[in-house]
Image (tube, grey):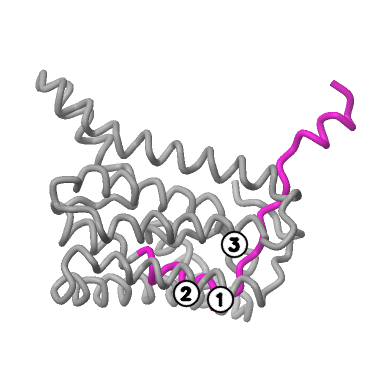
Amino acid sequence: MTARGKQSASPAPAASDPLALGLILAAAGGCMDAYTYLARGKVFANAQTGNLVLLGVRAFEGEWARALCTLVPVCAFIAGTVLTEVIRVRGGSLRRLNWRQLVLLIESAVLLAAAFMPGRLDSVVNAGVSFVCAMQLAAFRVLRGNPYATTMVTGNLRSGAEHLWRYARERGRESLLSGLGYFAVIACFVLGAGVGALAVERFALRAALLPAGLLLAAALVAVWTAPDAREKTPE
């Protein structure tokens, strides 16, 4: 393959999110985690580490049926990632929407449907939330030039601590702003989880409408913010 062919096949750089958008998305992420845990069978559907741990444990215990059940949200997560990539690649054909706004609208629609699904469909809802979180994680990766996540916080915690330690040593303003940005995202994730818990207590299964509304608000914020495609994609 020629150098020109390699260049055309490489993925486009990830857009860099403004802080306001990252905070709203983090609040939605925390709210979704609280919703699936408190209203849908005490499951954390945002990340798949726990499901893969259960897959290994149940497989080695010989519980193959239960082991295969843990693959449902994992497959939903993979499907959400792939769909987001397809939307990104074909996003140039969209006339009125940025491809990431389309992702947010799809996420909102899935959560809207989840709010009206009965309790016997908890496994379907949890798979849907895994699907939504995968889309969000794939579409929104960079905050002011730094890699971050809005559906889980472990990586943000590590990166925030690193930047603040760097600031303590070097007194660089950019390190301070980056570190505070990470911890602001974490705080909004926790806030979203708390508000989500209150919503579940009051509205039960309908509490999924709250993160759906937050994602619609994020889509509106994205309309007024021009993403900077020059930012590098995190490895």
Q: What type is the residue that disc 3 sits on?
A: Gln
Whether 208 is drawn above or below 220: the answer is above
Element type at mark 1: helix
Comparing marks 3 and 2, which lies closer to the viewer? Answer: 3
Magenta stretch mostly in which secondary structure?
A: helix
Q: Which mark is residue 19?
A: 1
Q: Nearer the viewer, residue 68 or 183?
A: 68
The answer to whether marks 2 and 1 mark residues whose Cβ atoms lie closer than 8 Å is yes
Across and down, in percent, residue 4 comes to 89, 32
Whether label 3 touches label 1, CB < 8 Å: no
Q: Label 1: how many residues lie within 10 Å, few (<14), some (14-19) or many (20+)?
A: some
Residue 35 percent location from the top left of the image: 24, 62
Count up the numbered dots: 3
Q: Answer few, some or many: residues within 10 Å of disc 2's Cα (few below 14, many 20 plus, some between 14 and 19).
A: many
Say left or right for 124 vs 175: left
Marker disc for residue 231: none
**What residue span does the magenta drawing correspond to?**
1-29
Cα gap from disc 2 to disc 1, whole angstroms:
6 Å
Look at label 1 and name its amino acid: Leu
Between marks 3 and 2, how big is the CA–CA gap?
16 Å
Residue carrying label 3:
101
Q: Residue at position x 89%, y 24% from top?
A: 2
Instruction: List x then y, in percent, for residue 48.
Output: 32, 43
Image quadrant in which you'd find residue 227: bottom right
Q: Position of residue 134 (x, y in %)?
A: 44, 48
Q: Quadrant of the N terminus?
A: top right
Instruction: Name which of mark 3 and mark 1 comes first in the sequence.
Output: 1
Picture disc at residue 23: 2
182 vs 20, nearest the viewer: 20
